[in-house]
Image (cartoon, helix red, strand yellow):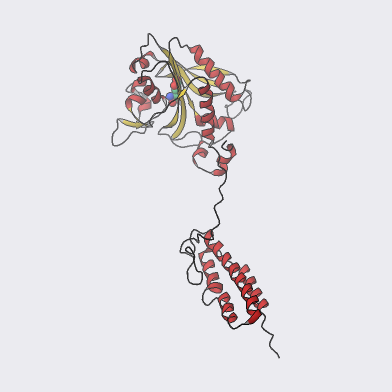
Amino acid sequence: MASEEFSWDKAMEAVRREAAGFDLSGEAGAEAYRLKFLSKKGEVTALFEAFRALSGPEKKAVGQALNALRQEVETRWKEASAGRSTGPGPGGDPSSQGPSEGPDLATLPPPVWGRGSRHPLALTRHLMLDFFGKLGFRWSDGPELVDDWHNFEALHFGADHPARDMQDTFFVSLDPAYLLRTHTSSVQVKEMMKGQLPLRTVSPGRVYRNETVSARSHMQFHQVEGLYIDQDVSFADLKKVLYDFATFLFGPSVQIRFRPSYFPFTEPSAEMDVTCFLCSGTGCGVCKHSGWVEILGCGMVDPQVLENCGIDPDVYSGYAFGIGIERLTMLRHRIPDIRLFYENDLRFVRQFGHAG
Ligand code: DAH
């Protein structure tokens, strides 16, 4: 029986098909592929050896086809190698190198850069600063690591105030006179002590509390502190600014209410609620069926605090407010869990609009 005549086309097609169907998954798969097709004893290399015996026009045609085949087979291997973090080195020769010697930079496809998006907390902070900026509030900043004076003492926290307790405050073990600020009110102190009046400022920043992390609270979060000191500043001024702020954020139909509250550094003190914008005040899970949600604390700066910071309370008065950025963002976007802000899951972050 006459043996079937050798066909270059068939031989190359067989290798091509086998290579295309080969499972390259994992480092072992890629290495098996390299050995089978591309190594010195591999099938593609064997075809090249047979090809050496050719001559004339056949040599040219087969040579071209063979080169194309080798390229195809190599590309699959390189792609699989690049998919893992390791692969052949630059200019890597798969006939001699293993796939774990660094990526082939020459053939590595370029990274695809997606369009970035702002973090939802940054978006809310931006909105807030924009609003207060238009009213003449200047942005100010302060350190996250502060002394007891800036965080507590100047703000009229008594020596035995529970907020100083180890359970609430992260103290620095090397020097317990220093702590991670528990609120941005510490920036108020810094700004007032500069003695440049009148003073109208908003201070965004990160704060820390020794709290158990849960869906509703975290050991780190962000606040925006507001402060206005001038002659004849009244509670009515404070209410007007905060009313405008709430309308700006939640629309013209929002209603606000002030509830008397207590903060050591303001007198009188209040918390501000807005009508729940999810249920429009009829009652839902977010407002705990009260129709209202609290969004900030505020008050008139206590004369003792002014004095502590070198400001004459007989001449000047002022108001202050502190707003939690996470809280506001969760309410505005119906985000159910505060931990989502810090997980850096792009699927979450991308839902809140692209950087402009
Ligand atoms: N510092 C307060 C807190 O972290 C928030 C606050 C309340 C700030 C009243 C103020 C204010 O400036 O007047 O809970």
Q: Position of residue 219 (x, y in %)?
A: 43, 35
Most extreme residue toward the bottom, as rendered? 1
Q: Position of residue 198 (x, y in %)?
A: 42, 15
Q: Quadrant of the C terminus?
A: top right
112 to the left or right of 100: right
Total numbered circles: 0
Q: Is residue 38 visible?
A: yes
**Residue at x-position 55% and y-position 70%:** 33
199 to the left or right of 45: left
Most extreme residue toward the right, as rendered? 1
**Residue at x-position 54% and y-position 33%:** 123
Quadrant assignment, res 353: top right
Quadrant of the picture in which ligand 1 is shown: top left
**As drawn, 33 above or below 284:** below
Q: Quadrant of the N terminus?
A: bottom right
**Residue at x-position 47% and y-position 19%:** 298
Residue placed most toward the observer, 149 or 248: 248
Residue placed most toward the observer, 200 or 314: 200
Most extreme residue toward the front, as rendered? 56
334 to the left or right of 227: right
**Residue at x-position 54% and y-position 15%:** 240
Q: Is residue 157 visible?
A: no
**As drawn, 59 above or below 118:** below
